[in-house]
Amino acid sequence: MSLARPRINRLFRFQWEPAQQAYVLLYPEGMVKLNQSAGEILKRCDGSRSVPEIVADLETAFKTSGLAGDVDAFLTMAEAQNWIVWSAD
């Protein structure tokens, strides 16, 4: 999965929602309000970056390390929720 590139499923629209002060996923039946971590990960799921590239970008942006496990766990959950789809190289 590490060479695959996640992107947000076309069934959802990802956007910043000022009223919620959070990123959200909109879909015909409603809305999912995302916490900050989820929003930052999904913001980078544009179909052009691999998981290691997403992790590296997050670690640089937040001046930390060791995020790979958390990112993998979130992406596994996001895939189960149908929020993301994968494109291979």
Image (cartoon, grey):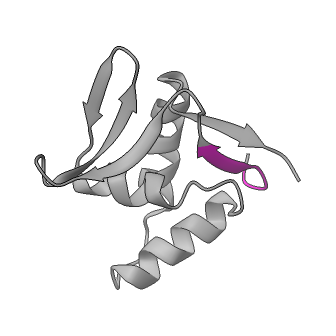
Extent of the magenta region: 2-7
Q: 6 or 2: nearer the eye?
A: 6
The quarter holding residue 40 reads: bottom left
Q: Is residue 2 left or right of residue 24?
A: right
**Magenta residue check for 64:** no
* Residue drawn 64% across the image and 66% down it: 52
* Residue drawn 51% across the image and 42% down it: 75
The quarter holding residue 27 reads: top left
State the count of labels.
0
Q: Is residue 88 left or right of residue 81?
A: right
* Rendering coords of residue 36 (x, y %): 24, 56
Q: Is residue 54 left or right of residue 28?
A: right
Position of the N terminus, as image quadrant, is top right
Q: 43 or 71: nearer the eye?
A: 43
* Residue drawn 52% across the image and 48% down it: 72
**Magenta residue check for 3:** yes
* Residue drawn 46% across the image and 31% down it: 77
Q: Is residue 17 left or right of residue 47?
A: left
The quarter holding residue 50 reads: bottom right
* Rendering coords of residue 24 (x, y %): 30, 42
Residue at the extreme top of the image, as rendered: 29
Q: Is residue 29 above or below residue 46?
A: above
Q: Is residue 76 above or below residue 47?
A: above
